[in-house]
Image (tube, grey):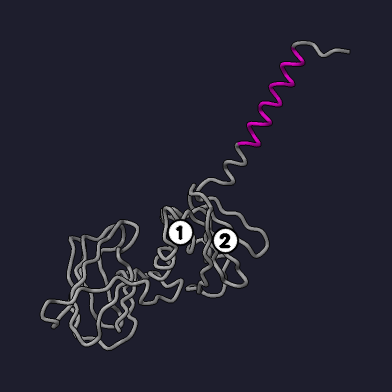
Amino acid sequence: MRPTPRAILIIAAVLIIGVAFVITNIQSANAPGTTKTEGTQITYIIGEAEEKSSVEIPVQLLEGSDAAHESAHIFETIAGVQGAAKAVLNTETLVLTVTYDPALLDPAEVQRTLAAVGYTAPTAADATAAEISADGAAQTIAIADTGQGLEPAVISAKAGLPLTVTFGPGKECRTTIVFPDLNASTDIVNGGTIELPALAAGTYAIQCGGGGNEGMLIVQ
């Protein structure tokens, strides 16, 4: 028995709806901001960049031992990195694998972004160096607030020289900047400056007034 034209139209409509549903689900599964968990692997879609290269970055937890819980904060940290495509966190090994388009992104930027908030140990290679004055007696550096964080977030300075850090106007919750290890702070609602004395070599945290990690100063 041949199907009637009405039956054919109904079948065609069902097929079209089914195909559209499948396509929508595939697109949704790969939409930026999407998270998927498979065993010990938590995958986060960062953006629509091509996955031409990848980098593995060991991370450390800041809020305890629950990597699955803290993964959301790690992914939030790198959500705005342009040129990154996908991040996969292994909750057992604590290795974050990020795929990216090398034409759009230097993978060192991912490392710097994570180091700024403490998810990886910062190194001098991640830092933007302060400028030493012409007479070699002091050093200065300017830091802006992009709305998503400080830029640069990881800075370096020479030991034994006073350092002036100038901040642009703060955004979001960053109304105050604190160097807790140095007992120094400033209001940056309209911008501000912190004068630091000659420092010993070491690593010093940069925090907002609420105690959240915003960056790092490496003195060497």
- Magenta residue span: 6-23
In depth, the one of 10 and 143 nearer the eye is: 143
Assign a secondary structure to mark 2.
strand
Magenta residues, dominant SS class: helix
Give the residue at x 60% y 37%: 24
Tag shown at residue 44: none
113 horizontally vs 188: left or right: right
Of residue 46 and residue 187, the one placed in the foreground of this image is: 46
Residue wearing tag 1:
76
Eyeballing the image, is 95 above or below 102? below
Q: Quadrant of residue 159?
A: bottom left
Q: Is residue 199 left or right of residue 121?
A: left
Q: Residue at x 54, y 66 (%)?
A: 96
What mark, if any, has residue 88 been given in the picture? Answer: 2
Q: Position of residue 47 (x, y in %)?
A: 48, 50
Amino acid carrying mark 2 in the image: Val
Residue at horizontal 68 percent and vertical 22 percent from the top: 13
Q: Earlier in the sequence, mark 2 or mark 1?
A: 1
Label 2 neighbour load within 10 Å: few <14, some 14-19, many 20+: many
Q: Quadrant of the C terminus?
A: bottom left
Using the numbered discs, state the Cα–Cα distance from disc 2 to disc 1 in whole angstroms: 13 Å
Specify whether 151 is left or right of 71.
left
